[in-house]
Image (cartoon, rainbow, N blue to C red):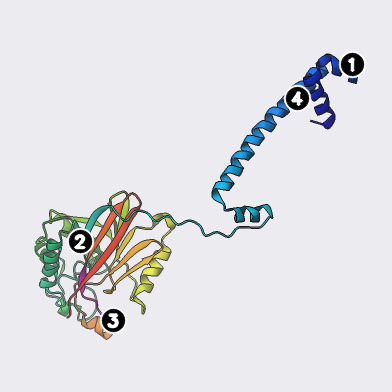
Amino acid sequence: MTERSLTIGNEAEDKGIEFVCDKYSIAKESAKRYRRHYRRSLRDMDESIIDNNTVIQKLVEQYTPSELRQLANGKALHRESSKVIHSFNGEKLTIGVMSDTHIGSKYTDDDYVLYAFDEFSKRGVDFVTNSGDVCEGLSNRQGHMYECTEIGYLAQKQRAIELLSQWDCTPQYMISGNHDRWYMKSAGANIVRDICDNIDNAVFLGDDEGNINVGNDTTIRLWHGEDGSSYAHSYRIQKLIESFTGGDKPDCLIAGHVHKMGYFFDRHVHCISAGCIQRQSSWMRSKRLPSHTGFWIIEMTLNESGIGTFKPEFFPFYV
């Protein structure tokens, strides 16, 4: 409204319609219209005052007098953002972790697997994982067959069933690795799936990777890969985590293939490089590749935010 309109409306409210009609020589309808606009402006002003008072009250509650003076003088505030730490309490989950068992290789002793099973039993693990290369397979590399205690698909499959079926306490989750897939590439045979089909508590999650969902939609991902070792043990895991899109990241990654052990925390993912059950083979030694032989037991707590605490423990075989 213009200043003149507000003046007429104010006088119409205070002194009456007849007064402003005579003073300003306007019709009654015009005088009533000015009064309506004036009354509406008062209501809007009252609401604005209430809103402003609410805002002021929030500012007083949120900022110190010194900070309020800075704001009044047009200066920016540089305050550290608040940090919320979720609860560390939750349901306990214990996992037995093996990888690269290479059953059928002369560099893998059955006792290594059985020692792991014994420790898993003592610690009461909720399930066991194997991140690929369950069997040694049979490649076209010259002399490879002489490194095998069981030669061929049927022999290695049967030996794996006999050995792995000795764990019958809780589920075993497995994926295939590149050694397992040599049978797939040469004859279309999926040896890890076939092993799991013959062990009651074994579950085949997929070729090269597979997910286990636990707790409140927490994802544990087993992964194998067909890349090679990196000079820094963490580098391979870091590049893998970088490659995941934001919505596809697991909460925990358990990676096999390179026979290296390590725990890393990157992009909010708990990462385990699982090591192996196989000793260093002659091929690995020829390539100057160390082999970290052993297994893991991981204890974590799960709550509404995902993983609350994460405690990995590696059990090395000094071979």
As measured in the structure, the alpha-carbon distance from the residue carrying label 2 to the one carrying label 1 is: 101 Å
As measured in the structure, the alpha-carbon distance from the residue carrying label 4 to the one carrying label 3 is: 87 Å
The residue labelled by disc 3 is 289
Image spot of residue 147 (x, y percent): 16, 79
Specify which label sits upstream in the sequence, 2 or 1: 1
Residue type for callout 3: Leu
As measured in the structure, the alpha-carbon distance from the residue carrying label 2 to the one carrying label 4 is: 82 Å
Magenta residues (range): 288-296
Image spot of residue 45 (x, y percent): 69, 32
Specify which label sits upstream in the sequence, 4 or 3: 4
Residue at (33, 49) in percent of width and height: 304
Residues 158 and 83: in front is 83
As measured in the structure, the alpha-carbon distance from the residue carrying label 1 to the one carrying label 3 is: 105 Å
The residue labelled by disc 4 is 37
Comparing labels 1 and 3, the label whose residue is closer to the camera:
1
Q: Secondary structure at mark 2?
A: helix
Comparing labels 2 and 3, the label whose residue is closer to the camera:
3
Mark 2 vs 3: CB contact within 8 A: no
Left or right position of 21 against 92: right
Q: Secondary structure at mark 1?
A: helix
As measured in the structure, the alpha-carbon distance from the residue carrying label 4 to the one carrying label 1 is: 20 Å
Comparing labels 2 and 4, the label whose residue is closer to the camera:
4
The residue labelled by disc 2 is 192
Q: Examine the residues drawn in magenta and state their main secondary structure.
A: loop
Residues 30 and 113: in front is 30
Residue type for callout 4: His
Residue at (60, 53) in percent of width and height: 65
Q: Secondary structure at mark 4?
A: helix
Residues 244 and 89: in front is 89
The residue labelled by disc 1 is 22
